[in-house]
Amino acid sequence: MRNYRPIIIEKIGITLPSIEILKLRLNEHLPESRSSFHSHNHGQFLIYLRGCGEQTVQGNRYPARAGTVIYVGPNERHRFEKERSRQPLCLVIDVNLLSNTKNRSITTLAELPATELNLIRSRVSQLFEMRGPGNEDKIVAVGAVILDILDPVLRAIGWLESKGFKSLSRGTVNVRVEKIINNQIEDASLNLTKISKMLGFQRDHLNRLLKKESGLTFSQIRSQIRLKRAQRMLINGSRVGDVCVAVGINDQNYFARWFRSQVGTVPTKWRSENATSIASIQA
């Protein structure tokens, strides 16, 4: 998000069981150090992508920096005060929360982890590329990107439950990459470049995130998944030629060398040794 370009998407028209999405825009706060108090008849998510300042909502002051999410309810008076010289960049999503909020522990202020902030930044970059008139497919694609932005935001403020979400200790980016590899493991052309485009990241940046979250590079993660799949198929009696194709390696000789580098022996010998061990345990 180094080069700011304004973006506004009006009349989005997405209505889910508990939320109506009205409008999205990317704002650079005004050059003045302090904007005036104002309010709206709808709710707003303020997602700060850069900069630093303070947001006041109903008389309560909240620090705002990159990764901060602030929910402003309908008719709540609020204003922003800038700190330092760089213009803060804020993604604003106008919404109506439709269901009863009494049983939900919605918080006004939340913080996104770095991985989720980077995901939202990458999705905003995708929206830049989608600007201009488009067909029905393009409109659906824009809606999908907006929903992808909202998912971590709604979880952060407590509107969506986070069960299973926070427990992903390896990190959400790592989990997404593993899911893609597992679903498309037989595709020999599946590589870091292709997956980074799917997720909206720069190739090298994605690899750095994976290394930070899991301690492993993309190649190491893919090798682990390939090995587990190959071992399972070998134990179940699949032919080596079928196994190597199923894990996205079309050259059987290369597969044998790769497998040996992973476990120290060739596939047929590994199967013989482990099949015997499993049979003796089951006997």
Image: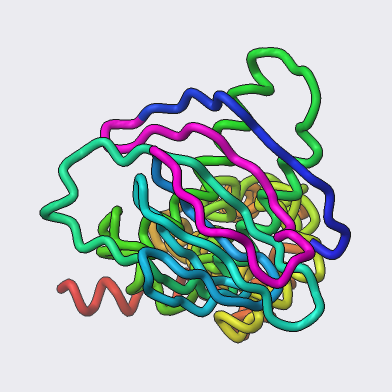
Depth check: 283 or 26 in front? Answer: 26
Give residue 170's position: percent from left, percent from top.
Answer: 47, 77
Res 222 quadrant in image = bottom right
| Position above or below: 170 against 147 | below
Residue 36 position within the rendered picture, expressed as x and y whole percent measured from the top left: 58, 59
User: Does residue 275 lie above or below 177 as drawn?
Assistant: below
Quadrant housing the C terminus: bottom left
The x, y position of residue 163, in whole percent, is: 25, 64
**Extreme right residue here?**
3
**Residue 159 in magenta stretch:** no
Query: Foreground residue, 1 or 36?
Result: 36
Left or right: residue 226 compared with residue 57: right
**Bounds of the magenta segment:** 16-41
Quadrant placement of the N terminus: bottom right
Magenta residues: mostly which secondary structure?
loop
Residue at coordinates 58% horizontally, 55% vertically from top-left?
A: 181
The single residue placed furthest to the front in the displayed view is: 36
Magenta region includes residue 27: yes
Residue 120 visible? The answer is yes
Say left or right for 280 vs 140: left
User: Could you tell me how many numbered marks the image carries?
Assistant: 0
Whether residue 249 can be seen here: no
Q: Give the color scheme: rainbow, by chain, secondary structure or one colour.
A: rainbow
Taking the spot 46% from the left edge, 76% from the top edge, the residue there is 62
State left or right for residue 121 relative to residue 238: right
Name the residue at the left extreme.
103
Please report the residue visible at 71 percent of the width from the left and 72 percent of the height from the top.
Answer: 33
Q: Nearer the viewer, residue 60 or 232?
A: 60
Eyeballing the image, is 116 above or below 61?
A: above
